[in-house]
Image (cartoon, helix red, strand yellow):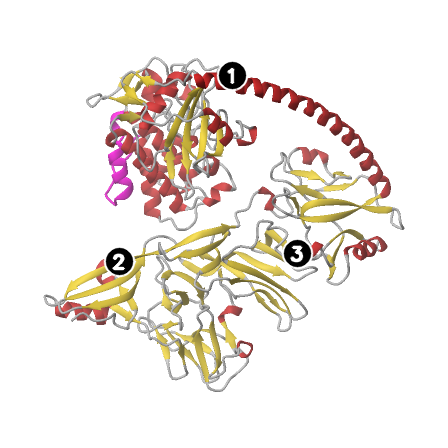
Amino acid sequence: MSGPPIGVSGHLNTNAFSGTDVRTQLLEVRTSPSIFTFWISGPDTESGEKINHLKINGSHYPLFVYSVFFSLFRISITQDSITPRQSITDGGTTLVSAGSSFQLGLFSPCNSKSRYLGIWYTTSPGTVVWVANREAPLSDHLGVLKVTDDGILVLLNSTSGVVWSSNTSSTVENPVAQLLDTGNLVVRQRNDDDSEKFVWQSFDYPCDTLLPEMKLGWNLVTGLERVLSSWKSMDDPAQGAFSIRLDPRGLPQMFNMEGDSIKTRAGSWNGLRFTGYPKLRPNPVFEYEFVLNEKEVSYRFKLLNTSVFSRFVVIPSGVAQRYVWIDRTFTWELFSTSQADQCENYGLCGAYATCNINESPVCSCLEGFFPKSPKYWDSIDWSDGCVRTTPLECNGGDGFLKRTGRKLPDTSSSWYNKSISLKECEGMCLKNCSCTTYASLDVRGGGSGCVLWFGSLVDISEYSDSEGGQDLYIRMATSELEQLKKKWRSGEKKLVAIIVSLALLVVGMIIVALVSYIWKKKLKTQGTTKINHGKEDMELPMLDLSAIANATDDFSNNKKLGEGGFGPGKLPDGRDITAKRLSKNSRQGLNEFKNEVILIAKLQHHNLVKLLGYCIQENENMLIYEYMPNKSLDSFIFDQAKSKVLDWHKRINIIHGVAKGLLYLHEDSRLRIIHRDLKASNILLDNNMNPKISDFGLAKSFGGDQVDSETNRIIGTYGYVSPKYMVHGRYSEKFDVFSFGVLVLEILSRNKNRGFCHPDHHLNLLGHAWNLWIEDRSMELIDELVDNLCTLSSVLRHIQVGLLCVQRRPKDRPNMSSVVQMLSSENLLPKPKQPGFFSDSPKADSSYGKHRTCSANAITNTLFEGR
């Protein structure tokens, strides 16, 4: 008779199956007379686990069933605490919190053989949130955790030597060590749950993860500092180079440090958020708390829904990320990231300057100031900052210039008072000749409190009205303020003239619009044009021009996405779209337009961009695509800041996705299609960074038995076009294979093939990659920003596949079905031969022997490029 789940949880020792150290959690065991069903969760992705089950016929293999149950599973004791008479042993027992949220035991991270005492999520065993002996790993599986009679936690090695201890000076009678459901490991007196009386707690010693209720900052009474610090790597939880800490000097503020240097500054707390994080706004998942008094200065977050798991972690590369656990998919969803733009680099613009990421150049002096070193400033070296145009007069000769939407300057040399008003704050600053600026301490309820700055103002950023920011009052000489007011009055007069001119223009536009409306109505009564390309039906809806115009704000420049592209827009049915508008001056564009509609209408694959419809009306030819919020791949891999988002897993996911899309085009679609313009800018990324191949204006379809074809019009993109095509104009599926290989090497190295520059040679990226390969130095090709999640074998495999795809002779290159297989298997790969276009110089490679009309890198010789 079938019974309920056995009340046991544990971990499957998969060494018995695979020889690897993969941790797999036993969630549930169901029994019947002949079947044992083991419900387990095991690592599936970087941030989550996947549920699987294993059924074993007990009647046929009774001894095996019992051996699995008693020898392959590490049983977790159901209690959440231990006393001095109990212990936690490696491979024997773990602690599980009362609500089964967290588990404590000994583990090995990733590929490491060292053992550590840690705490992890029960539903996600691979997600470790705290490590005790991060600087002193155990070398074997004989570690033991105990609590002494004095209430000190000790981790002992095989010789009973102390590897790590809680090392507290306080003692307690009848101690107990307990793992709370918050993830906090505490030592307390038995029968006393008062958190204020805990003898010791792991929350006071964070590692790389900030959990709900865990504090970051200072206990000003004891001098204890709670700091977040990254792991050295995914395999080594020792303290890494990056940390996040609160600086208590002046008005306390949060820093992101690299070693002893400030990397970025979140700024001070203004009652709602850190001034450097204007987008840190209220949400339904958690709330923020900042405490500033004589006893402590601390920051923490609290969950509004305790059934939700959320964590804030500093990864080894220094990026801070917040994750939320999704029960439905058993994965961690990235909620937010502290991915820094250029303006977040600490002190980028120097003193008395402001940084605006939406301007070019990003740095500019505050009004009333000019560059201290104009020569360096014009060379994009802003570190010397700015100086005053007019010195301060003091003694009643100064005033204040109000600037809005600013990240407050570095507050380490500031003074603050919580009780005085902003008006009193101004008076205090005027009375002190050393005071340079003032602002509100708390922005809630119209503002309260006072912050005064003494000395230079450093690390100011400027935000738009929608992003937030804070008012800043900068001290200036009265004479300088008067000059600025005159300049503003002159500007106001010019503005009035502009407004009048615009009003007249608007009236004229209304008249034109009325005439246009009448003309449109007339056209509609005559019917709209329908396209039928020979026997090829479009098989797509033809959308109304007015609906597309409304979705794109009448093709406003604010909606423009490159030449001819407009988005995002929203159709009346709620779909987000991108409109691709054919140039009216194009001579060849209509053919490409028909070609793209006919081809894409017949293609359905999750790695191809989806065409939603088309419009041919009033001399307008438009394609309507699904909107890709992350735009194109080149905007990530060739951008210093954005490329940090692409960790190793995302990069190989993009490579594999593009390969599958090409395989579908070449072999699995109704038409055999050669794209002929595969490049980074034609790979679009959706919300989850999944790749979708776009822009089929240059694509060609092949017959079933056709091997290659020839063209008199050479089109494509330099750096991606194969040698045979450039010389003879002949193309085949191997054309796309070559382009794919170039794309792989660009993704891995974050360098463009065309225009690649190296101090030791004049080769392009293909030549550079080839030289590194034959010298067995291929790892030097990999982008330094790629995190440590990658393995050497995986890296070398992807480089080798890229080199195989760019071999000079088409017959040496693999087809896309072989490429997909090579990327996903562990089989030995053939050795690549020298690539085509080995040198970037036309003279260095005979493949460039004929001058052809190709475009420059990342620009295709097609007349519409909108998305």
| Residue at 46% over, 86% down | 174
Direction from residue 386 to residue 711 in the image, left or right: left
Note whether 318 is above or below 547 in the view shown. below
> Mark 1 belongs to which amino acid?
Trp
In terms of secondary structure, where does tag 2 sit?
strand
> Mark 2 belongs to which amino acid?
Asn
Highlighted magenta segment, given as a residue range = 810-833
536 or 668: nearer the viewer = 536
> Mark 3 belongs to which amino acid?
Asn
* Location of residue 626 by image quarter: top left
In terms of secondary structure, where does tag 1 sit?
helix
* Location of residue 659 by image quarter: top left
- Outermost residue on the front side: it is 525
Q: How much space separates mark 2 and mark 1, taking CA atoms?
A: 64 Å
Would residue 39 be seen by someone viewing this image from the given angle?
yes
Would residue 19 be seen by someone viewing this image from the given angle?
no
Note whether 5 is above or below 693 in the view shown. below
* Location of residue 19 by image quarter: bottom left
Q: How much space separates mark 2 and mark 3, taking CA atoms?
A: 48 Å
Number of the front mark, 2 or 1: 1
The residue under label 1 is 519
| Residue at 35% over, 54% down | 329
The residue under label 2 is 52
The residue under label 3 is 270
**The N terminus is located in which quarter?**
bottom left
566 or 78: nearer the viewer = 566
| Residue at 62% over, 34% down | 360
Query: In the rendering, at what x and y percent does residue 100 appear?
Result: 38, 69
Q: How much space separates mark 1 and mark 3, taking CA atoms?
A: 56 Å
Query: In the rendering, at what x and y percent does residue 653 appear?
Result: 36, 43
- Answer with mark 1 or mark 3, whichever residue precedes in sequence: 3
Note whether 646 is above or below 499 in the view shown. below
